[in-house]
Amino acid sequence: MKQSVLIVDDEFGLADITADLLRDAGYEVTLAINGKLALDALAAHRIDLVLTDLMMPVMDGPELIRRMRADPRFAAIPAVLMTALPEAIPEGETALHDAVLIKPFSIQEVLGAVERLLPALPRDH
Amino acid sequence: MGRVDTGVPGLDTILNGGLFKGGVYIVEGPPGAGKTILGNQICFHRAGRGDSTIYITLLAESHTRMIAHLRTMEFFRPELIVSSIYYISAFKVLEDAGLEGLLKAIQEAVHARRAAFIVLDGLVSAEEFAPTPRAFKKFIHELQTISGMTGCTVLLLSSTERVAAFRPEHTMVDGLIELGETVVGVQSLRHAVVRKMRGTRQLRGRHSLEISAAGIKLRPRIEALLHSPEEDDPAPRQVGTANFGVIGLDAMLRGGLPGGSTTIVLGPSGSGKTMLGLQFLSAGARDDQIGLYLGFYERPASLLAKGARLSLGLEAARDRGVLHLFWEPPIEGGLDAVVERVLRAVIDLRVTRLCFDGLHGFRHHAEYPERTRAVFSALADELARRGVTSLFTLESTDIVSSGIEIPIDGVSALADNIILLRHVELRSQLYRLISILKVRDRAYDGAIREFQITDRGVVVADTFDSAEQILTGAARTVAEPETPR
């Protein structure tokens, strides 16, 4: 079974490209355009890792991660914040996410972050 | 209705106080006109004032790229982002759920963040997703309903090549600001026009727009701005007589120029216009009247050296703070920038005498030379209103001519006084002559006199009556010539 990544971003250009990249690398990818839809996706699919944008309509990335950490079903899923503005990450949120990807990020940076947080499981079988 | 100031230099003046709270405004223009910078600049300003703002893009362009560019702008303050400025992309919402979905998303975002100001970047995308023109109009109408109910001011950024074209949404919104660019000669000039502004009297016409690291700055068209005086502005002041400190000339003027009046000194190159202007400022400085020289060609150091040769005491006057020398090399920014600088100096430095040297150089600053007369008129009025006695030099085209030609149409009628400097050829030698063509509402001596520049300054001699047709510049001896003094 493939490892599964949920990408949450209201900017679909970047999200689509990142999804293609991860699929090519052997991951299964699900997309959501805000935190609320991401929670629905988490409930509906098996997700191993969440990559989420910071600012989104309806529910933003930090709120999504807060809700994940508060829900025993998702609390252990690693989460990566993606942002062009690392200085805009609200104070006190640092402990809730596992990594930050600063946009624009390179292929190596996104693959490196995903591989670091999902090292143990095989991607393909 | 309350006003929402934009913080964009010049824009609130043009809008006569800013946008209206809860209003919906379109900013349109071609790509690169500055719409995105303008939208962001206002967001940062409003955020700095404590407003919650949202920047919504309907474009496929990524926020990442936009923010990377914004980082170079001085108004960019990352600490305001998320807390007070929120960037969201609604392109996917628009693609998936159409205009209804977009409206819902906007409504939710405004509600969730208690937004007071939003920018919707990419109105063209919304129009493209509208199934019919009617649906698009309905979208604008519903957006107005949201803004009206929440008091949230909305700026719609629309990229269009057809800036002057009428569009149905223009009739619906509260204001329409057009940004554009025009190539004049080799210059590319940005501008802004407020085509519509409900509920207030905006400054009409084309205002110049600059984009720098500081963001967008608008220069209100000075003739429009100055012709809209505030009610509490001081009335024109009469400030006596402004002499030249030149016995002969002051005698011709019955003591000097009327205080607060506007004078044109007309003459060809080398006739002594600049010297007469410096003499005028020097005389004022002796009485502690603060003078400002503004020139387009000679640098202050060169002028001070000239002044020293003529014993005008310019350097000492400058050191005492009663003389200020400004040099305005040709720059992009045009007439409005020059006038703004003059008026700022007049106010800040409490200038009472101005030598504007010269109007011909000023015309070279003009993106649209036909504006020169109107701008001169507005500037002269404003200076008079502030009690400044101003002297504008203007170069005539011919060194020795048989006629009097004023090279900028209409300025002579606007000036209170005109002093004419001429070269006259006599026995293969050029002499300088001075005469007064006009002094408004005051008697003067209209005789022609010789004018000399000496190491004691400007000297005006007795009436020069030895040659014929002197004023036409065609003097020829008819018998034994009188020896020039």
Image (tube, rainbow, N blue to C red):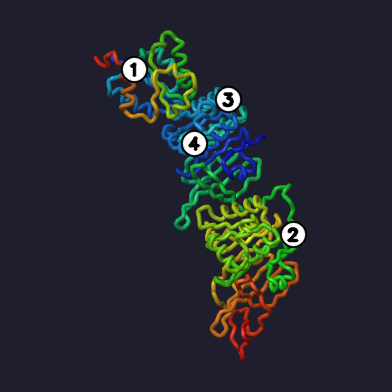
Q: Are marks 3 and 2 in contact (CB under 8 Å)?
A: no
Asked whether, in this view, residue A120 is left or right of residue B191, the answer is left
Viewer-nearest residue: A68 or B72:
B72
Q: Amino acid at mark 2?
A: Val
The numbered mark, 3 or 2, whose residue comes first in the sequence reads 3
| Callout 2 secondary element | loop
Q: Amino acid at mark 4?
A: Leu
Residue B239's disc number: 2
Q: Which callout, 4 or 2, points to the residue nearer the camera? A: 2
Viewer-nearest residue: B242 or B289:
B289
Q: Amino acid at mark 1?
A: Leu
| Image location (x, y in percent) of residue B57 | 47, 32
Q: Is residue B408 visible?
A: no
Q: CA distance from mark 4 to mark 3?
A: 22 Å
Residue that protrudes farthest toward the left in the picture: A125
| Image location (x, y in percent) of residue A112 | 31, 23
Q: In this rendering, do the residues under marks 2 and 1 share a single chain?
A: no
Asked whether, in this view, residue B433 is left or right of residue A120, the answer is right
Residue drawn where x is 34% and y is 22% of the image: A113
Q: In this rendering, do the residues under marks 4 and 2 share a single chain?
A: yes
- The N terminus of chain B lies in which quarter of the figure? top right
Q: Which residue is mark 4?
A: B123
Q: Answer few, some or many: residues within 10 Å of disc 4's Cα (few below 14, many 20 plus, some between 14 and 19).
A: many
Tell me which corner region of the image, top left, top right, bottom left or bottom right, holds residue B177: top right
| Callout 4 secondary element | helix
Q: Answer few, some or many: residues within 10 Å of disc 1's Cα (few below 14, many 20 plus, some between 14 and 19).
A: some
